[in-house]
Image (spheres, coloured by chain):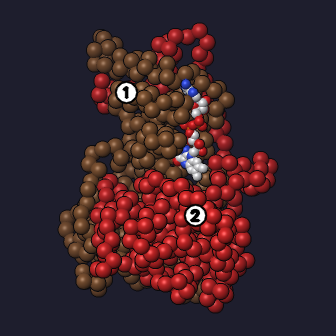
Chain colours: A red, B brown
Amino acid sequence: MHIVICIKQVPDSAQIRVHPVTNTIMRQGVPTIINPYDLFALEEALGLRDSHGGEVTVLTMGPPMAEDALRKALTYGADRAVLLTDRYFAGSDTLATSFALSHAIAKIGESFGTPDIVFTGKQTIDGDTAQVGPGIAKRLDLLQLTYVAKIASIDLNAREITVERRSEGGTQTLKSKLPCLVTMLEGTNEIRRGSLDDALRAARSQIVKWSAADAGIEDLTKCGLRGSPTVVKRVFAPPERAEKAEQIDTTEKTPRDLADELIAGIFSRQPGLENELAFNGGA
Amino acid sequence: MKKGLPAHFKDYRHVWVFIELERGHVHPVSFELLGEGRKLADKLGVQLAGVVLGPPGEATWFAIAEAFAYGADLAYIVETPLLADYRNEPFTKALTDLVATHKPEILLLGATTLGRDLAGSVATTLLTGLTADCTELDVDADGSLAATRPTFGGSLLCTIYTLNCRPQMATVRPRVMAMPQRGNNQVGRVVQHEVPMVEEEIVTKVLGFLSDGQSAKANLAYADVVVAGGLGLGAAENLKLVKNLARAIGAEYGCSRPLVQKGWMPADRQIGQTGKTIRPKLYIAAGISGAIQHRVGVEGADLIIAINTDRNAPIFDFAHLGAVTDAIRFLPSLTELFTHRLSPHSRDKLAN
Ligand SMILES: Cc1cc2nc3c(=O)[nH]c(=O)nc-3n(C[C@H](O)[C@H](O)[C@H](O)COP(=O)(O)OP(=O)(O)OC[C@H]3O[C@@H](n4cnc5c(N)ncnc54)[C@H](O)[C@@H]3O)c2cc1C
């Protein structure tokens, strides 16, 4: 079985600071990580390979330094890494990204064997759109299984896959066919620590580097900014709330007095609430 | 901006809202979007349509009636048994086909699991732009959709345009937009659309569905009162303080992200950018710092109460009222006094 997994190197956005005057992101010194949701997908892919045999190819599109993310994925146990990198990709929105990645996946298929499953995380933590997975599926005409919490079974002979998929208010069990694209939810599996062998292999491994041309992309107008129907017109900081919280003075107050005062404060601001809470409270 | 629009897109008009119907229930986010869509349609001087994809039957027609009650001028419907349970293939086909035939200028969907799954496929099929998780929608001077969304983990907002392609697509998370008033009108023009599809063409089959039932998973986003705990509570066992308070005042409970990462609470209790957006009348945050990713999920609350030991914690920048105190010691007293104040006994006394 050949599994391709798409990962993204993202800034650890907990550590991003915004320049107070220019409203731009201060990226200097911000560490990068593999998008956390992609790690769940990677673990799922590795687990499937371990039980069904085959290979895992990890793919990312990004600047040359995204190689670090790929090397990390190799230390977890991926068999092969492909970096799709070209200045033509700069400024890609989700439509342009899915265009480039789908070409790279097709090329991976030609070079290393057609993938049975393409994995992505459910979304990235910097873009947050959850659109690239469905975009790739559409472009490659793959069946799409998103928000998958669990792969219940795979039958390689019958080419069938059964998954549990989160939906609003419940979990769907879906049966579909291979090849397909799966986007993985968080928290469904424990990410392994790579073995020493994997670490050594990762350090020695050649990472396959492809430009747009290498990936077989002829129409560059579909890449990067030019290929992106959406454009960012304005970036700005969220407006500050005019008034800060009124803080109840707590000095020399018992918790009971304080509670009394807080409750009075709540009901004086929202008089309608008292009846509602009394009605709903289970006490 | 609109000037460069290719001629074949010039006849794309009207604002559409996808009415999300799954197993007979209209997701409330669809009504929130109709409220927003109404404003956009009025600014553009065009009509607002609800789009319903569902199986033949009462629930589907009820969804249409509700779309009219929440402000739609007309409704498009594709009715076939293939649309009973959500599956990407028939839904994508039906919606893409409708768009290609009737040409909306703007298409809005809820950023739910269903909406995101569908929107990504439809936008890619139509090769048009899609802006995810918008927090504000507007129409600019030349009639283009200006979609604002958080970026970089919520630290910044950006306004995005879809150039040279139609429709302009956007998704919005549940509870980000206000619920509009429901009117009395339940009738309007319905345009029925046939999409040639047969079950045999659809590879993916639904084997089963396990409902979360009445558990809070589905209710948190729509709860009127929410109590949440953060890392300041110090230990998993202290979460019962939050749950007790929630029970006393009939609230749902939730948490900040680190608690989910520590396994103290399940992921669907998480509030914030990567969790749920809530819009309660009252939100009480205990031991939560108020990081930007948390803030964006709770800002729509009418009244935000913070309990935090640090008087400089960012949560006090957007809360309305706060107590600078140790939540672990304070929550039991607060629960007790709430219970006392809300009990019928003390209320009767008050009334007398
Ligand atoms: C991509 C990304 C997405 C994220 N998404 C979310 C999200 O959806 N939701 C979310 O919540 N976070 C999210 N975060 C995390 C967010 O940045 C913060 O790390 C998180 O909200 C902090 O949680 P906290 O306030 O509970 O903990 P802390 O930041 O540790 O704050 C604890 C607070 O408790 C106070 N405190 C300590 N002891 C007590 C006490 N005894 N009584 C009262 N107060 C006390 C402290 O003063 C402090 O203010 C995200 C981060 C990233 C990078």
Residue depicted at x 29% and y 64%: A173
Whole-percent x, y for residue B147 in the image: 58, 63
Whole-percent x, y for residue B103 in the image: 45, 80
Disc marking residue A198: 2
Q: Quadrant of residue A163?
A: bottom left
Neighbor class of circle 1 (other Cα within 10 Å; few <14, some 14-19, many 20+) is: many
Image quadrant occupied by the N terminus of chain B: bottom right
Neighbor class of circle 2 (other Cα within 10 Å; few <14, some 14-19, many 20+) is: many
Relative depth, front residue between A277 and B352: A277
Q: Quadrant of residue A157?
A: bottom left
Q: Chain of mark 2?
A: A
Q: In the image as oriented, which residue stretches furthest toward the bottom? A: A218
- Residue A76 visible here: yes
Residue depicted at x 52% and y 10%: A254
User: Do the numbered discs 1 and 2 sit on residues whose CB atoms are within 8 Å?
Assistant: no
- Residue B111 visible here: no
Which quarter holds ligand 1? top right
Of circles 1 and 2, the one toward us is 2
Whole-percent x, y for residue B191 in the image: 32, 77
Q: Chain of mark 1?
A: B
B75 relative to A87 in the view: left or right: left
Q: Which residue is mark 1?
A: B244
Relative depth, front residue between B184 and A29: A29
What amino acid does circle 2 point to? Asp
Location of residue A179 with respect to B349 vertically, above or below: below
The residue at label 2 has a CB less than 8 Å from ligand 1: no
Tally the marks.
2
